Image (cartoon, rainbow, N blue to C red):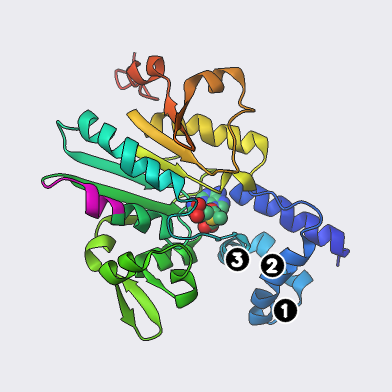
């Protein structure tokens, strides 16, 4: 079998191909810590397990899932949620007064705290007669199952959830906390690899693409931000993480995304010239 560095290079190339995530040299310990339990379960050595995921698609999916970093919390960074309530939501209530419907996408949802933080705000601030849909997507099926379950440990609850909201929206079930059914009903859960085409998702008034771009290389980040343009509805907003930037975008993409400051938060909006452009179908249906 190969040396440790060859094994790591093979895993790193596979992860990059499958998910767009970058595992640079120096992360060997992390890869082994995440995959060793799966190798043990499969009854083989770490090196043999790496060989196996090259050819076994089911085990490969499991391994990719185990290699995702799912760090998250309620109302993470606080300021984006304040900006949502104070500025984005009032503007969208005006912009969507004809349809009275809002669509929000939590595009790297992890265990769901981001989607459910928005659900709690909509529950409190959306006027009567309005409807909303929050679409929570992730590449990890384990995380998607967690969003569906809507159950959290005490440690997770302690990360950013105000006590008033715990009392209002959660019920204790054994040693976990379960979020209210009416909030779960607001969230649609779906698998979506950000490195793959966005199909059948529709457009969104707010896209939360937070704390996930950092795991990709520049090329993948730019490609995602290019494909994200038609996903944000006119007058809609894109939010990226506080440690993420669009300052290195190539000129055409930089011109397409307009940066706007709301308090301490920088949001992105589709430049008006692009937003007004009619959508051109990819395939001509006329046969001409
Ligand atoms: C650090 S969490 C961020 C969660 C949340 N957005 C937040 O800001 O708290 C990153 C999430 O991105 C997901 N992820 C990683 N690569 C992905 C990809 N290629 N497509 C979709 N999701 C991906 C991971 O599974 C993980 O749940």
Mark 1: give few (<14), some (14-19) or many (20+) Cα within 10 Å: some
Task: Determine the residue positioned at 78% across, 62% down.
Answer: 28
| Magenta-span inclusion, residue 14 | no
In the rendered image, is residue 160 in sight?
A: yes
Q: Earlier in the sequence, mark 1 or mark 2?
A: 1
Q: Earlier in the sequence, mark 3 or mark 2?
A: 2
In the rendered image, is residue 203 in sight?
A: no
Task: Determine the residue positioned at 79% across, 59% down.
Answer: 8
* Secondary-structure class at tag 1: loop
Which quadrant holds the C terminus? top left
* Secondary-structure class at tag 2: helix
Left or right relative to 133: residue 195: right
Of the pair 92 and 186, the residue shown nearer to us = 92
**Cα distance, mark 1 to mark 2?**
9 Å
| Magenta-span inclusion, residue 126 | yes
Which label sits in the foreground, 3 or 2? 3
> Disc 1 beta carbon < 8 A from ligand 1?
no
Q: Which residue is mark 3?
A: 66
Magenta part of the chain: 121-128
Q: Earlier in the sequence, mark 3 or mark 1?
A: 1
Q: Is residue 231 above or below residue 241?
A: above
Q: Which residue is mark 2?
A: 52
In the image, residue 77 lies at what x, y percent? 50, 51
Please report contact status of discs 3 and 1: CB closer than 8 Å, yes or no.
no
Q: Which residue is mark 1?
A: 44
Q: Residue furthest right?
A: 3
* Secondary-structure class at tag 3: helix
């Amino acid at each position: 079998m190969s040396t440790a560095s060859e094994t790591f290079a093979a895993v790193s190339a596979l992860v990059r191909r499958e998910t767009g995530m970058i595992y640079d040299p120096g992360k060997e310990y992390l890869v082994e810590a995440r995959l060793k339990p799966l190798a043990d379960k499969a009854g083989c050595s770490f090196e043999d397990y790496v060989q196996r995921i090259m050819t076994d698609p089911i085990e490969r999916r499991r391994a990719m899932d185990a290699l995702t970093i799912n760090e998250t919390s309620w109302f993470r960074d606080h300021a984006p949620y304040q900006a949502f309530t104070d500025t984005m939501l009032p503007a969208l209530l005006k912009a969507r007064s004809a349809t009275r419907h809002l669509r929000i996408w939590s595009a790297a949802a992890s265990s769901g705290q981001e989607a459910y933080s928005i659900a709690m705000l909509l529950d409190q601030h959306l006027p009567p007669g309005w409807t909303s849909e929050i679409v929570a997507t992730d590449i990890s099926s384990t995380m998607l199952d967690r969003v569906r379950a809507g159950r959290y440990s005490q440690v997770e609850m302690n990360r950013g959830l105000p006590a008033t909201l715990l009392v209002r929206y959660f019920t204790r079930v054994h040693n976990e906390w379960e979020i209210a059914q009416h909030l779960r009903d607001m969230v649609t859960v779906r698998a979506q690899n950000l490195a793959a085409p966005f199909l059948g998702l529709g457009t969104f008034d707010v896209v939360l693409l937070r704390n996930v771009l950092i795991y990709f290389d520049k090329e993948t980040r730019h490609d995602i931000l290019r494909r994200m343009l038609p996903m944000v509805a006119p007058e809609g907003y894109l939010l990226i993480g506080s440690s993420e930037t669009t300052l290195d975008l190539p000129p055409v993409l930089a011109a397409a995304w307009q940066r706007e400051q709301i308090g301490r938060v920088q949001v992105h909006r589709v430049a008006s010239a692009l937003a007004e452009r009619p959508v051109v179908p990819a395939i001509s249906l006329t046969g001409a």
